[in-house]
Image (cartoon, rainbow, N blue to C red):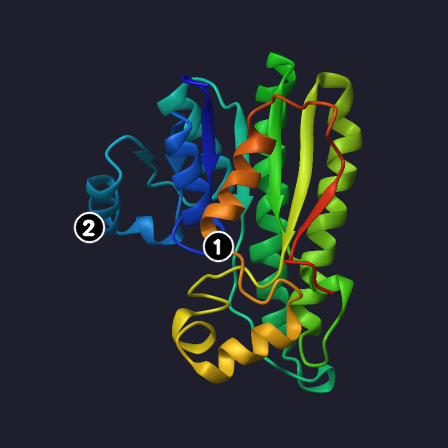
Amino acid sequence: MGGRTALVTNVLDYGGPGAVSALEKASYVIACHDRGFADPEARAAYSAAHPQVRVLSAQEPEAVVAETIDQLTTIDAVICNDVHPIRHTPIEDVCVDDLRATIEAVLITPFRLAQAVIPHMKRRGSGSIIAVTSARELRPEPGFSVPTTARAGTTAFALALARELAPWGVQVNAIAPNYLYSELYYPRAAFIDDPAGQQLIRDTVPLGRLGTPEEFGALVEFLASGTAPFVTGQTIAFTGGWP
C-alpha cells in the first residue's frame, strides 16, 4: 500500500485524527488540512507531531486541492471530514444565519472540494472520495434540525456524485457516524469520564460505548485503499448498532 496518497480535511476534529492515524500506519503520503492551520504556529506544531505528513496552509477548497496536487502530484483518496459546532435549538428558534453557516461548512465546502478534484480523478481514471457525514437522519432528534438537515444533504450529494463518477472508475461513499468519540461532538469529559454520560451511552448505543477513532480510521482506510472498487454509492453507518 506504500506510495498511495490522500487528502484529509479538518484533521484535528471529528473523524480526522482516526483517519490520519490509520492512513499513516498504512504508509500513505497524506496532505492534511485544518481550519486551524491558517496559523503558522499550528501548522508547525502538527508537522512536528506528524513528520511524515504534508501540512497545508490553504483554506478555500479549490486552493486546498491545488496545494495538495502541488505537494503530492496525485491524489488517490479524498476524505471530506467536514465539521461545524451544533446547538440544541427548537426549529422555531433557529437563527437562519446559523443554518446557512452549517450548510456552508458541511455541504457547500465538500461540494466545492469535489468539484476541484473531479477533473484530476477523471483524467487518472481512478480515485476514492469519502464524505464523512452523520447518521442523525436515521432518527432525527428534537432540537437538532440544523445538523440533521445539512448532513442529510451531504449524504445525498455523495450518492449523486458516486453515480456521476462511476464511469470514470472513481469510488464515492459516505460514512455516517453517530456516537464517535471526538472532542467536538462527544467529548471525553462528558461521555467517557462522567458516569452519567457513560450510562447515557450504554442506554442509547447497542454496543454500549462510543466508537473509537481507531475503528473509524480502519473503515476510512478500507474505503480509501481502492481494493474494493465495486463498493461505491453507499452510506455506511458507523453507529455501534444505533438506532
Does residue 131 appear left or right of residue 33 in this picture? right
Q: Is residue 230 above or below residue 223?
A: above
The x, y position of residue 154, in whole percent, is 69, 51
Residue at x 51%, y 47% (from the top left corner):
215
The quadrant in which residue 148 appears is bottom right
Q: Is residue 71 above or below residue 109?
A: above
Q: Which amino acid is tagged 1?
A: Thr
Q: Which amino acid is tagged 2?
A: Glu
Quickly name the residue at label 1: 212
The x, y position of residue 136, in whole percent, is 69, 64
Residue at x 51%, y 36% (from the top left corner):
62
Disc with the residue nearer the chain's start (2 vs 1): 2
Tell me the distance, in whole angstroms, between the alpha carbons under discs 2 and 1: 28 Å
Q: Secondary structure at mark 2?
A: helix
The quadrant in which residue 232 appears is top right
Task: Determine which of the numbered discs, if any, sits on residue 41 in the image.
Answer: 2
Q: Where is the C terminus found, in terms of image quarters?
A: bottom right
